[in-house]
Image (cartoon, rainbow, N blue to C red):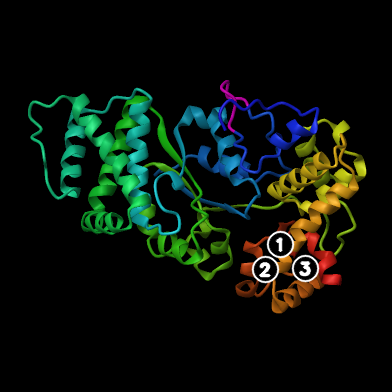
Amino acid sequence: MKNFDYIIATDLDRAWLNFELDLPLKPEKNGKPNPFYINRPGNPIAELTDALLAPFYRPPKFFFSGHRGCGKSTELLHLMSNTEIQKKYWLINFSIREEADIFDIDFRDVLLAIGGRLFREYRKKGGELPEQLLKELHSWKGKVEKEISTVLEGRSDVEMGASIDAFFANAGLKIKLEPATRVELRQVVETDITGLIAIINHIAAAIYSREHLIPLILIDDMDKPDLEKARAIFQERREIMMQPNCAIVYTVSSALFYAKEFDSIRDQAVFLPNIYLHPPMEPNVHHEDGYRTLRNFVYQRMSPDLIDAQALEAAVTYSGGVFRELARIMRTAIGRARRRKVAVLDLSDIEWAASEIRNEYRRILDKDDIKLLRKVSENNRLEYTERLRPLLQLLALLEYRDEENWCDIHPVLRKLLND
């Protein structure tokens, strides 16, 4: 969203905008955190930050995950505003959606996206790459296109750089939009995968030699492909994905954390849990740190005068500790309040929003799902994950982390299970 002013709403029209579900929480230009950013209790992003700042022999790779709506994209953007990270790394953050078709993605697509973004972002920021590297890139481009269409002699660095820019941009576009060309490009890249990795490493080395900063690439939306594609990329091709000589944070599907293949990424995995709102088996006992965090999430977007206290407590409870779910509840409730032509949200607006979400689940869940949800609500155990995985992906079940992992049903479903 361009030119969005992150200001606290004093009316419901503005509040409606502030609870946009896909509102990007980019750091401010001065490097300070976004005004809407909430620092969660015991934030595990600190673990990722510390790991990136620790000494290493080779630039590290990490696999970052969490349930849908828990704030992964926001935390990656916040990581970029960390001054110590900025002193150590030359940063790139992008969504794989911009470079590939996330419903038909392949490890070769990801590697091509990494190389292309490294090259294009560095040049866009005014960086100059050595002439020899440009010639090497141009030659590799020609091999991929199965022909070298121009003679290097007599061409300027600017001309060569522009043609490589265009190649990477067009290759990404074709991979994203043209299934037939996508297959051909993958086949060509497959024949020289070591050449592509060498190109990535040469670009990264050139950036480091000129900027004295290690490239760090944060790739968002890699958690969107299904489990089979995640397995193919991060388990079957793990060694290849670890080879680029730059630091990388891959977002990965939370489903991978509930599969036996998790062992392949265990040592570099960081999981962003939902906000802890109550102890296991005690849904009516409120954990104050969690409730305070989510109240602040609301109050940093709208004035307390726009919602009564009882309604806010209900909204936090129904969210289950998931930021996106709270934003969805608030936006739905604000929509109803605006239609009622009132200036303040009350409990009836929140209950209506919760019923809307509950009705969505009614259409999706079958009898076996309901039976399993009832069992989990009675014991809060995270077990038989093959059976629980689809419900965790749907957010019908929510995972929490205290001393041990446990899970509970989405709070809006309690009424459904009692019917």
Is 284 one of the magenta-colored residues? Answer: no
Q: Are marks 1 and 3 in contact (CB under 8 Å)?
A: no
* Secondary structure of the residue carrying numbered label 1: helix
Q: Is residue 413 left or right of residue 91?
A: right
User: Looking at the picture, how far across and down is residue 271, in whole percent?
Assistant: 61, 53
Using the numbered discs, state the Cα–Cα distance from disc 3 to disc 2 in whole angstroms: 22 Å
User: Looking at the picture, how far across and down is residue 415, in whole percent?
Assistant: 85, 65
Q: Which mark is residue 364?
A: 2
Sequence-wise, the earlier of marks 1 and 3 is 1
User: Looking at the picture, how far across and down is residue 153, in whole percent?
Assistant: 7, 29
The amino acid on which the numbered mark 3 sits, given as a three-letter code, is Asn
Sequence-wise, the earlier of marks 3 and 2 is 2
Which residue is under mark 1?
360
Q: Is residue 128 left or right of residue 63?
A: left
Q: Is residue 16 left or right of residue 137?
A: right
* Secondary structure of the residue carrying numbered label 2: helix
Using the numbered discs, state the Cα–Cα distance from disc 2 to disc 1 in whole angstroms: 7 Å
The amino acid on which the numbered mark 2 sits, given as a three-letter code, is Ile
Quadrant where the C terminus sits is bottom right
Q: Residues within 10 Å of mark 1 (few under 14, many from 20)?
A: few
Q: Which residues are magenta?
A: 26-32
* Secondary structure of the residue carrying numbered label 3: loop
Q: Is residue 114 above or below residue 3?
A: below
Q: Is residue 224 above or below residue 93?
A: below
Q: Residues within 10 Å of mark 2 (few under 14, many from 20)?
A: few
The amino acid on which the numbered mark 1 sits, given as a three-letter code, is Glu
Q: Are marks 2 and 1 in contact (CB under 8 Å)?
A: yes
Quadrant where the N terminus sits is top right
Q: Which residue is at a point 44% across and 47% down the rendered structure image?
A: 96
